[in-house]
Image: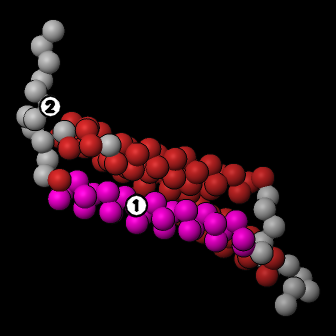
Amino acid sequence: MDEQDPKEDLIEPVFRNGTVTTVGILLAFSLGFITHWAANPIPWQTYHLLAVVPILVGIALQMRALAILLDPKSLQRSIHARANRIFITGLVFTACGVGGAILLDFFDIAAKSALPGAS
């Protein structure tokens, strides 16, 4: 079996550390958003799952990427690249969910303010 030398094709530790910082910060923002949205005074409805599910999937993917990046093996270029792909996928899911949440809240508020007798 032809094994690749783990010292070949490594990224700089400083670069990996910057990636870990970025992933950690954006993961914290994602967790903060879902926490804030969960505390929203608008009652939750079943259709809110359209936004919550992608956000939670995105957060799970971001957490997975962070876990991979915290392993010293992530200094290998292929592992680092895999963690980046997982993170970007998680970020896209989270962004879609956040956009959906904003739209759902907007339409919910607009529908309530359009009702007769609403102030």
User: Residue 79's spot in the image, x, y percent?
Assistant: 26, 38
113 lies left or right of 58: right
**Residue 3 sits in quarter:** top left
The residue drawn where x is 58% and y is 51% is 56
For the magenta stretch, what is the residue range?
14-40
User: Residue 47's spot in the image, x, y percent?
Assistant: 73, 54
Alpha carbon separation for disc pair 2 and 1: 26 Å
The residue drawn where x is 8% and y is 34% is 8
71 lies left or right of 38: left
**Residue 98 sits in quarter:** bottom right
The C terminus: image quadrant:
bottom right
Q: Disc 2 or disc 1, which is closer to the eye?
A: 2
Q: Tell which residue pokes out farthest to the right in this image.
A: 117
Q: In this view, does 29 lie above or below 3?
A: below
**Is mark 2 in CB contact (under 8 Å) with mark 1?**
no
Q: In this view, does 67 lie above or below 6?
A: below
Is disc 2 surrounded by few (<14), some (14 to 19) or many (20+) residues within 10 Å?
Answer: few
Whether residue 79 appears in magenta in the rendering, the answer is: no
User: Residue 67's spot in the image, x, y percent?
Assistant: 40, 45
State which tag comes first along the sequence, 2 or 1. 2
Residue receiving disc 2? 6
114 lies left or right of 18: right
Q: Tell which residue pokes out farthest to the left in this image.
A: 8
Residue receiving disc 1? 24
Q: Considering the numbered disc 2 on the image, is that residue within a helix, a strand or a loop? A: loop
The N terminus: image quadrant:
top left
Q: What residue type is labelled 2?
A: Pro
Q: Tell which residue pokes out farthest to the front in this image.
A: 72
| Residue situated in front as seen by the camera: 46 or 22 | 22
